[in-house]
Amino acid sequence: MNEELFKKLSEGFFVTEDITEYTYGEDGKKIPLKGKQTKRYIPPDSVAIKAYADMSGGAKSYGSLTDEELEEIKNGILIKL
């Protein structure tokens, strides 16, 4: 699997599905009765997030970071909250 696929799976995405209901005629053939199109959100996958982080080199061990780097990460998270 390639890095682009893991990125897509780790971010989540929308898919469009076509749903068609059928009925059977007297001759036994399928006849489309009604159809609709739905849009679904596929949430991020935790395994894909880890795999993408490993592939892109984004996964760092927090034990190897300096106190200043840890402080920057903490402040960035607090700002987002």
Image (cartoon, rainbow, N blue to C red):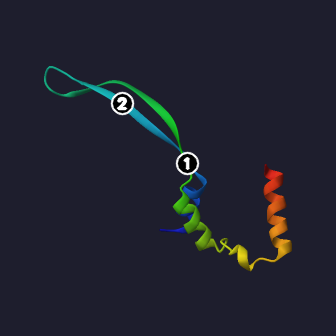
> Closer to the camera, 40 or 62?
62
- Cα separation, mark 2 vs mark 1, equals 25 Å
Residue 79 point in image, percent of width and height:
83, 53
Q: Is residue 66 above or below residue 26?
A: below
Q: What's under tag 1, amino acid-wise?
A: Pro
Pointer 2 and pointer 1: residues touching (CB < 8 Å)?
no
Query: Which of the labelled discs sits on residue 57, or is there none?
Result: none
Q: Identify which residue is drawn at 82% across, 54% down.
A: 78
Give the left or right position of residue 50, taking residue 32 as reference.
Answer: right
Frontmost of labels 2 and 1 is 1
Q: Identify which residue is drawn at 71% across, 73% down.
A: 62
Q: Is residue 12 above or below residue 50?
A: above
Q: What's under tag 2, amino acid-wise?
A: Thr
Give the left or right position of residue 2, taking residue 65 as reference.
Answer: left
Q: Secondary structure at mark 2?
A: strand
Determine crowd level at label 1: few under 14, some 14-19, many 20+ residues with C-alpha closer than 10 A. few
Determine crowd level at label 2: few under 14, some 14-19, many 20+ residues with C-alpha closer than 10 A. few
From the image, tell me which residue sits under label 1.
43
Residue 25 point in image, percent of width and height:
19, 21
Residue 55 point in image, percent of width and height:
59, 73
> Looking at the rendering, which quadrant does residue 75 occupy?
bottom right
Q: Is residue 77 above or below residue 62?
A: above
Q: How many marks?
A: 2
Q: Is residue 16 above or below residue 13?
A: above
Q: Earlier in the sequence, mark 2 or mark 1?
A: 2
Residue situated furthest left in the rendering: 27
> Looking at the rendering, which quadrant does residue 46 occupy?
bottom right
> Closer to the camera, 65 or 51?
65
Give the left or right position of residue 26, taking residue 76 as reference.
Answer: left
From the image, tell me which residue sits under label 2.
20
Residue situated furthest bottom in the rendering: 64
